[in-house]
Image (cartoon, rainbow, N blue to C red):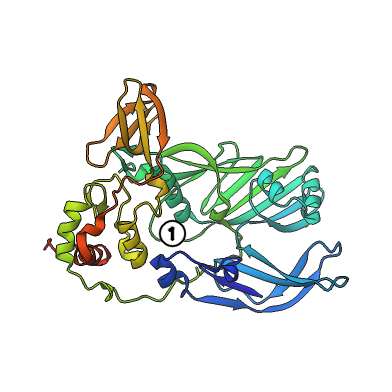
């Protein structure tokens, strides 16, 4: 059996419990899936590969193969569950004295060292890598996902570029590009650009809203010590990093992405039925000292702007039992300085050797690493317990405000 979908993963049928987040109940559990027909199956000559003939894959998404097995000798049976996607590239190797490819197939990555590691144990790929030591040409082709790649680079950069506790990015769009770098011996083509490996730099991809996949191909000369790598960096994150496999798909990957859940009408959940205006006032007096919501408040604890997407029960628990689930991005630390001063807060860093400590009710404090005697993580949240003192009506009002999809009721 093969099942595809945006949120489909191997082992889904084995889960006994899923977290109570709203995105799971309203999106993941109801997003469409597609059962793919399997028309036939066979084994490779060496009996190491299972070959399946299937109907066309309709979406570019995650697919799960469930393959049953039974032992003829013991009678035991079981089920193998495996994820797969369209990630990877097509590879064709042609010997120097030939006109047709002597090997054609799939590689998990254009970087040959990465592909070699991922395919270890495959007899077919072992033969391929032996052929690369011979004179010839390796043609690699695939598609890049520029929007996802640029967005990922931005997210990674935001986790490292911090100014007064708030992640920032360069405002200049020209600085927000992704550069692909290649090492090899031959030529490449990406989109409408082409060159040889002499420059090393492939191209810069500026993030936009509607880019489709970009086709690329590389013709690499082979021989003893054949090498091919593809890495990325950006203006806002100059560190060179390997190109992640999830940003590369095969040339024949479907264009359509798997659909999400059907759209629902927006609105405040009927189960709350509180007063959003009163909730806004309570939030400003009791919560905004440590949390931001729709751009207002202090960024000590987690930003609550995603509250309308969360499960109501989980949000209620976070308010009444703050120590039940600790956010890994906002853990509290106790810092003892060499002069005896003790500071408690959430720690961030905006440059090497210096920490910015966000305290619950005080201004942030800068601490040099050379000033610290010891620093330990606390097992509890900075958020105090006892917010049930708001009363059921007050709690209902705050929840109504946090889960409403309308602007602040105090604003016109």
| Residue drawn at point x = 79 percent, y = 42 percent | 133
In the picture, the quarter occupied by the C terminus is bottom left
Which of 213/77 is in front?
A: 77
| Residue drawn at point x = 77 percent, y = 47 percent | 129
Residue 215, given in percent of the width and then of the height, sits at 55, 57
318 to 231, vertically: above or below: below
- Is 318 left or right of 116, judged from the image as shown? left
The secondary element bearing badge 1 is classed as loop
Q: Is residue 73 visible?
A: yes
Q: Residue furthest right?
A: 73
Residue 148, given in percent of the width and then of the height, sits at 46, 55
Residue 236, given in percent of the width and then of the height, sits at 40, 40
- Is 106 left or right of 196, judged from the image as shown? right
Dot 1 crowding, Cα within 10 Å, few <14, some 14–19, many 20+: few
Residue 313, given in percent of the width and then of the height, sits at 35, 66
Which of 239/65 is in front?
A: 65
Residue labelled with disc 1: 211
Q: Quadrant of residue 80?
A: bottom right
- Is 141 left or right of 235, judged from the image as shown? right
Q: Quadrant of residue 394?
A: bottom left
| Residue drawn at point x = 53 percent, y = 41 percent | 241
Which of 1/43 is in front?
A: 1
Q: Quadrant of residue 392?
A: bottom left
- Is 134 left or right of 191, judged from the image as shown? right
| Residue drawn at point x = 56 percent, y = 74 percent | 58
Q: Is residue 101 visible?
A: no
């Amino acid at each position: 059996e093969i099942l595809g979908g945006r949120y489909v993963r191997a082992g889904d049928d084995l889960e006994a419990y899923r977290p109570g987040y709203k995105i799971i109940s309203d999106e993941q559990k109801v997003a469409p899936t597609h059962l793919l027909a399997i028309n036939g199956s066979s084994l490779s000559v060496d009996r190491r590969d299972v070959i399946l003939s299937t109907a066309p894959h309709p979406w570019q998404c995650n697919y799960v193969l469930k393959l049953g097995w039974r032992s003829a000798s013991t009678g035991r049976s079981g089920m193998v569950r495996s994820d797969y996607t369209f990630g990877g590239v097509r590879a064709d190797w042609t010997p120097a004295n030939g006109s047709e490819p002597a090997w054609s197939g799939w590689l998990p990555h254009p970087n040959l060292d990465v592909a070699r590691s991922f395919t270890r144990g495959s007899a077919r790929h072992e033969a391929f890598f032996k052929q690369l030591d011979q004179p010839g040409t390796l043609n690699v082709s695939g598609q890049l996902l520029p929007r996802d790649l640029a967005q990922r680079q931005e997210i990674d950069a935001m986790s490292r570029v911090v100014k007064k506790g708030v992640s920032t990015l360069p405002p200049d769009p020209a600085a927000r590009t992704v550069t692909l770098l290649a090492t090899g011996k031959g030529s490449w083509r990406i989109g409408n650009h082409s060159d040889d490996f002499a420059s090393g730099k492939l191209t810069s991809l500026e993030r936009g809203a509607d880019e489709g996949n970009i086709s690329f191909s590389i013709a690499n000369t082979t021989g003893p010590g054949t090498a091919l790598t593809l890495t990325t960096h950006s203006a806002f994150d100059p560190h060179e990093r390997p190109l992640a496999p999830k940003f590369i798909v095969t040339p024949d990957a479907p264009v359509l992405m798997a659909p999400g859940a059907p759209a629902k009408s927006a609105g405040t959940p009927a189960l709350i039925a509180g007063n959003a205006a009163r909730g806004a006032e309570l939030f400003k007096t009791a919560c905004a000292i440590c949390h931001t919501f729709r751009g207002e408040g202090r960024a000590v604890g987690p930003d609550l702007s995603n509250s309308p997407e969360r499960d109501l029960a989980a949000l209620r628990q976070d308010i009444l039992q703050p120590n039940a689930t600790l956010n890994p991005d906002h853990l509290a630390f106790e810092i003892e300085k060499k002069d005896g001063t003790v500071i408690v807060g959430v720690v961030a860093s905006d440059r090497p050797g210096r920490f910015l400590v966000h305290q619950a009710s005080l201004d942030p404090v800068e601490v040099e690493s050379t000033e610290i005697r010891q620093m330990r993580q606390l097992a509890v949240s900075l958020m105090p317990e006892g917010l049930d003192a708001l009363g059921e009506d007050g709690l209902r009002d705050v929840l109504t405000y946090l889960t409403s999809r309308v602007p602040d009721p105090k604003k016109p």
